[in-house]
Image: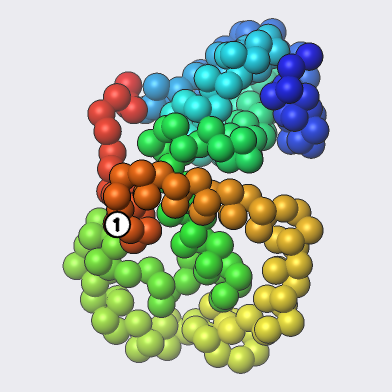
Amino acid sequence: MGKLYEKLMQDYRFKEGMKACINCGTCTAICPAAEFYKYDPRSIVDMVQSRDEEAIEKLLKSETIWYCGECMSCVTRCPRKNAPGLIVMALRSLSIDEGYFIHSEKGRQQYVINKEMYSNILNYGYCVYPRTFKYEDHPEYGTTGQWIEQNLDEIHKRVGSNLDGDGPGILRKIPDEDLMQLRNIFEQTGAFKRMDTLKRLSKERADSLGLTEEEYSEQIFNTISEGHFN
């Protein structure tokens, strides 16, 4: 048994997701991502099930594992109750831990996603926080989004949310003791270590390209190459 497969075996999601694949292809037939991306969950499970180290390493360096939307439609249809979505989650974690994510465009984008999302979670308690969601970074938000940003407090007051307020309510201020608990969870689960790996390897790549951290973040955030879609 190879090193990479052994590490996958240590991930509870892999243990839960990999049972006895019969290669029927039902997961691919039901998969929303497979309809649009060059993505085939059946072939991913088949590749991992082979325990071929070279094939698994190639998969960890590929774009493929980042196409999954983690909707879990696959497990609802699999006749053997495999969960390709969970297997992909385990592969993504291993790709980051081993530094293979840096080899793919979608893998490199995890740096921006994690930087923004983790910052929101740790500082405010929300994955998406209105005051950090900027129109200039998301022009697809449209002019309505721009207007919302410019009138944020008034709009949230009108719709009845409790943005940054005390007590209960949507988007309420999360107490400091709860944010500290989130930090403890990140520490105990290894999330901080994974964040450090993402940051360290991304900085090395930025330095090799002669880019600042901000320039590198902007580049990978806006780069979409051809060849991802069917």
Query: Who is closer to the viewer here, 32 or 66?
Result: 66
Query: Would residue 32 be seen by someone viewing this image from the given angle?
Result: no
Q: Could you tell whether 137 is left or right of 4 in the image?
A: left
Residue at the spot x=51%, y=53% of the render? Answer: 199
Q: Could you tell whether 71 is left or right of 6 in the image?
A: left
What is the quadrant of residue 109 in the picture?
Answer: top left
Residue at the spot x=35%, y=89% of the render? Answer: 154
Query: Would residue 161 be seen by someone viewing this image from the given angle?
Result: yes
Q: Which quarter of the rendering shows the C terminus? A: top left
Query: Who is closer to the viewer here, 41 or 89?
Result: 89
Q: How far from the left and from the top, in percent, is residue 78?
A: 67, 20
Image: 71 above or below 113: above
Query: Who is closer to the viewer here, 203 or 152?
Result: 203
Q: In the image, what residue type sits under mark 1?
A: Glu
Residue at the spot x=77%, y=24% of the render? Answer: 6
SS at mark 1? Answer: helix
Query: Who is closer to the viewer here, 180 or 126?
Result: 180
Q: How far from the left and from the top, in percent, is residue 1?
A: 78, 14
Q: Looking at the image, what colour scheme do you see?
A: rainbow
Q: How far from the left and from the top, in percent, is residue 66?
A: 49, 35
Residue under numbered circle 1: 215
Q: How far from the left and from the top, in percent, is residue 91?
A: 62, 31
Q: Residue furthest bottom?
A: 166
Residue at the spot x=65%, y=15% of the render? Answer: 53
